[in-house]
Amino acid sequence: MEAAKHSVLRLFRDRWAVADVLLRLALAGILLAASAGKIMDPQGFSAVVRDYQILPSAFVAPTAVILPWLELVLGILLLAGRMRLGTLLLVNALLLTFLGALIANYFRGIDVACGCFSTTREASSPMPWDIVRDGAFVALALGAAWAYRARQRRGLVD
């Protein structure tokens, strides 16, 4: 009990620790929420991936199956606080890829359903909103990586 109390007090004395935990948990929630609908409806998500017109058709189905599970695993790792540096690197790469795909299609004039939290077109929001939201997710992920690295430099985490 005393060790847990000490850990909580130490957490709140280190502002980077608070940022690290809050940003990590927010990202975990986003990834877990994003993965759920895609895992439940791989065919619907496959249509969303195909509509982006970026991947060759042979890669659409495998991507639609693997990507939601990757989001789930990354969300769980963030939630558990395990393999943080590698997890944050992958999360940032993934979110930057999503943002890049949205921006590319916006400028190509292709109106796509984001597929972020739903596999149906009806649930889609306007693309500029999706771009802004995904940009905020990237900022959140970069902030999480920054906070973790700040704690690492101070020797507060492994």
Image: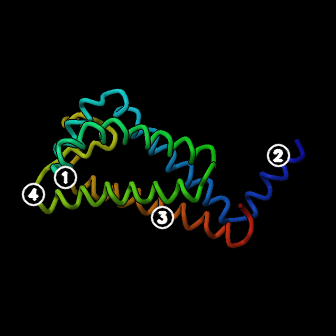
Q: Cβ–Cβ below 8 Å for labels 4 and 2? A: no
Q: Earlier in the sequence, mark 4 or mark 3?
A: 4
Label at residue 4: 2
Instruction: Say which of marks 4 and 2 sits in front.
Output: 4
Q: Amino acid at mark 4?
A: Gly
Instruction: Say which of marks 2 and 3 sits in front.
Output: 3
Q: Which residue is mark 4?
A: 109
- Is 135 situated left or right of 129 in this image? right
Q: Which residue is mark 3?
A: 142
- Is 13 situated left or right of 108 in this image? right
Cα gap from disc 2 to disc 1, whole angstroms = 49 Å
Q: Cβ–Cβ below 8 Å for labels 4 and 1? A: no
Local packing at callout 4 (Cα closer than 10 Å; few below 14, some 14-19, many 20+) is few
In the foreground, 12 or 51 = 51
Q: Earlier in the sequence, mark 4 or mark 1?
A: 1
Question: Which residue occupies 28% across, 61% down?
Answer: 100
Instruction: Say which of marks 2 and 1 sits in front.
Output: 1
Q: Earlier in the sequence, mark 2 or mark 1?
A: 2
The image position of residue 29, as x and y in percent, is: 49, 43
